[in-house]
Image (cartoon, helix red, strand yellow):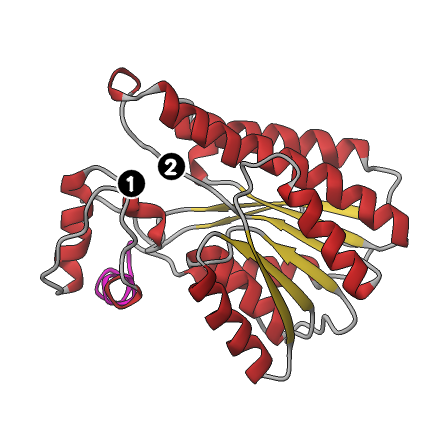
């Protein structure tokens, strides 16, 4: 970014902020002056992010919870508004991927993806817009989608991101007369814990390229140092969470007359493990 964002006086909520893209977005918003409320399932990681934001004279609070539980996002937003009196930025980032072929998938995994990627995002959109209207905010609803939404054959996970784009486009039209903008961010390949549910061969290849000799079981959290090393070794084919955070900062710091509706953030080359 050529001009640092100044978000002082604004309140932001970020879901899925325990790691990866969500963590980077939350810390970037906090560094820019926003009072950030971080939501996720890993309390220790959330506390570390809050500490980093506070260390830069920022303001941040955490809430441990699962966005798949109906009412969790509403409670998160209600808490943020109760503490600050407003809501200006809502980042619907929480996401889940089980990238198996349709014939290898299970209804449980499909249900988890749709509840996290679509239904929770819908709740976040609706609840945040109501909060922004109530306080008269010139707000931003930021929905984290994926480049998978640009492909017609991107599987069950991709179908959830097609839904995210459709929801974003529809909400953008519904809010045409409101001072609330809807921003869709579509990241490409990025080294985050999002990869923990990838095919074993792909995950092994990613870890191997990081230079670490460790084994990570199906669904287990990948150590930050492994992800950072993999991103460094594969910088041409893996973007960083901070790259996505920069895109979010750019979108939410524009003047009200400018609406950044969609941004694609992808590495220079396609990843081919």
User: For the residue carrying disc 2, how many other residues have a C-alpha within 10 Å: few (<14), some (14-19), or many (20+)?
Assistant: many
Residue at 65% of width from left, 33% of height from top? 122
Q: Are marks 2 and 1 in contact (CB under 8 Å)?
A: yes
Picture residue at 68% right of the left edge, 75% below the top: 33
Sequence-first tag of 2 and 1: 2
Task: Identify the residue position indicated by label 2 in the image.
Answer: 97
Quick one: 257 or 76, which is closer to the camera? 76
Image-quadrant location for residue 182: top right
User: As drawn, which residue projects farthest toward the top?
Assistant: 103
Q: Where is residue 248 in the image (x, y as percent from the top left)?
A: 59, 58
Q: Does the magenta stretch include residue 155?
A: no
* Residue stretch rendered in magenta on the structure: 227-237
Residue at the image point whose x is 66% and y is 41% from the top? 124
122 left or right, relative to 11: left
Per the image, the residue denoted by label 1 is: 197
Q: Position of residue 187 (x, y in %)?
A: 45, 48
């Amino acid at each position: 970014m050529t001009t640092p964002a100044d978000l002082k006086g604004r309140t932001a909520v970020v879901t899925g902020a325990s790691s990866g893209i969500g963590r980077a977005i939350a810390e970037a918003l906090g560094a820019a002056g926003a009072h950030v409320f971080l939501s996720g399932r890993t309390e220790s990681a959330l506390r570390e992010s809050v500490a980093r934001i506070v260390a830069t004279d920022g303001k941040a609070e955490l809430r441990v919870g699962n966005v798949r539980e109906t009412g969790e996002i509403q409670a998160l937003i209600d808490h943020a508004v109760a503490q600050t009196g407003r809501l200006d930025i809502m980042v619907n980032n929480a996401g889940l991927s089980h990238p198996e072929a349709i014939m290898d998938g299970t209804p449980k995994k499909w249900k988890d993806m749709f509840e996290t990627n679509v239904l929770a995002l819908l709740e976040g959109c609706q609840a945040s817009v109501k909060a922004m209207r109530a306080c008269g905010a010139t707000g931003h609803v930021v929905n984290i989608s994926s480049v998978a939404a640009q492909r017609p054959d991107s599987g069950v996970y991709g179908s959830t991101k097609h839904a995210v784009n459709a929801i974003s486009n529809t909400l953008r039209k519904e809010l045409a007369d409101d001072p609330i903008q809807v921003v869709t961010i579509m990241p490409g390949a990025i080294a985050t814990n999002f990869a923990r549910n990838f095919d074993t061969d792909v995950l092994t290849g990613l870890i191997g390229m990081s230079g670490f000799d460790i084994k990570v079981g199906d669904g287990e959290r990948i150590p930050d140092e492994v992800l950072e090393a993999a991103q460094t070794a594969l910088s041409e084919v893996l973007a960083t969470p901070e790259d996505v955070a920069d895109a979010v900062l750019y979108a939410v710091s524009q003047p009200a007359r400018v609406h950044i509706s969609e941004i694609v953030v992808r590495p220079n080359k396609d990843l081919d493990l």
